[in-house]
Image (tube, helix red, strand yellow):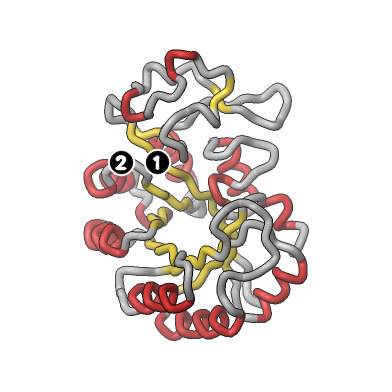
Amino acid sequence: MEKIEIATHRGGSKRFPENSLAAFLESWAHLAIPEMDIQRLSDGLLLVCHDETLDRTVENLPSSLKNRPLSEISSKEIKELTLETTLKGFSPPLPLFEEVLQYVQKDPKKQIFIDNKSASLTREILPLIEYYRVEKQCWVTGTSLSDLEEAKKLLPTIHTQVWVNAPSLEEVDSLFTKALANSCIDSVLFVLAKSRKPTSSFHLPHWYIKESELKCRKKKHSLAVYYTQYTRPLFQELRSLGVRRFAVDVLEDFKQLL
């Protein structure tokens, strides 16, 4: 049986906060690939954070920072802040992008997905990846084919993954066809649910997922799926369709299905 590959959305941990180094370390310990989000701070440093503000993710956020865009906050202002966590007694600091790259650099087996939110991919993110010499360990991911093309041209050994998420099969197929024809794209991610709310149905028919998997293999691309909630029957059905790469919200829950 082919090896199953797992990517953890924002680190994908119950024990540790999203986009924390602790969550990434846990993913790596389970041989999964964590995904992180990048925001630019006012002084140019890059913060690992999904939202445009710190209100949802930071514990005891000072009133002076509430509802303030990260683009107006400096690295000095967040230095003493910690992330909220479900693990009692442990609230980790907010990681900078470079700090995560330093951990990636220590072990050539570590890989990471990078989802850029507000920084410049070409002028800020890629130069740091090149500086730490971790191009082969990094995946840049997103919805823009042009951005991913540019990344591949600047750093040919970096990995690229495009998200395919559309409201109709026709639109999905159009995006998928363009991605498949693009030599700069290494992987296609089907986003099968639009939110983290549980849902019991696919947004794509099974036959289309199976055909897409076969097409990707012929083109030497890879196909991944992201679903907000996996069940054993759902996982087994996806495996029967040939899917072997999964993006998950909670690594611990998904591992129980293996």
Query: Which residue is at 29% across, 26% downward?
Result: 42
Residue that lies at the very extreme toward the front in this rendered image: 167
Disc 2 and disc 1 in contact, CB within 8 angstroms: yes
Query: Percent x, y for residue 50?
Result: 46, 40
Query: Which residue is at 40% across, 41% downward?
Result: 38
Question: Which structural element holds mark 1?
Answer: strand
Query: Percent x, y for residue 174?
Result: 37, 77
Under mark 1, the amino acid is Ile
Residue identified by numbered label 1: 38
The label number, if any, that marks residue 61 in the structure image:
none
Is any atom of residue 78 visible in this view? yes
Q: Is residue 53 left or right of residue 255?
A: left
Residue 86: which quarter of the image? Answer: top right
Q: Residues within 10 Å of mark 2 (few under 14, many from 20)?
A: some
Front one among 81 and 108: 81
Q: Is residue 16 left or right of residue 130?
A: right
